[in-house]
Image (cartoon, grey):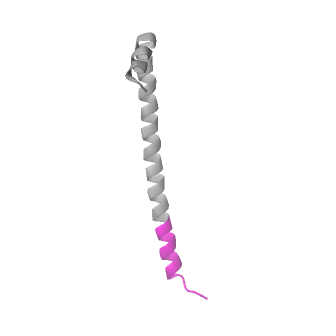
Amino acid sequence: MPDSVFVTLLTEHGPWVLLVFYLLYRDYQKDQATRDLLNKNTSVLTELAVLIRERLPRN
């Protein structure tokens, strides 16, 4: 987006626009942190499942 769009939004709507963009940005950061944590947990659980499967006796 061009810089003029932000200037126009700020002059027409004031600080509420900044607040909305800030809250959306923070929500995005929280979502990314949650996704990273879930990906890490998934890889750990996969590794544990492989270790358990390797150590189980085969019939």
Q: Out of 18 and 9, give the one closest to the viewer.
A: 9
In the image, what residue occupies the spot 41% across and 11% down? 11
Q: Out of 48 and 4, give the one closest to the viewer.
A: 4
The N terminus: image quadrant = top left
Residue 13, picture quadrant:
top left
- The furthest residue to the top: 12
- The furthest residue to the bottom: 59
Magenta segment: 46-59
33 versus 16 height, above or below: below
On whether residue 9 falls in the magenta region, the answer is no
On whether residue 55 falls in the magenta region, the answer is yes
Q: Position of residue 15 (x, y in %)?
A: 40, 16
30 versus 23 height, above or below: below
What secondary structure characterizes most of the magenta part?
A: helix
Q: Position of residue 2 (x, y in %)?
A: 41, 24
Q: Out of 23 and 53, give the one closest to the viewer.
A: 23
Count all numbered tags in the image, as a single digit.
0
The C terminus: image quadrant = bottom right
59 versus 41 height, above or below: below
Residue 14, picture quadrant:
top left
29 versus 48 height, above or below: above
In the image, what residue occupies the spot 49% across and 81% down? 55
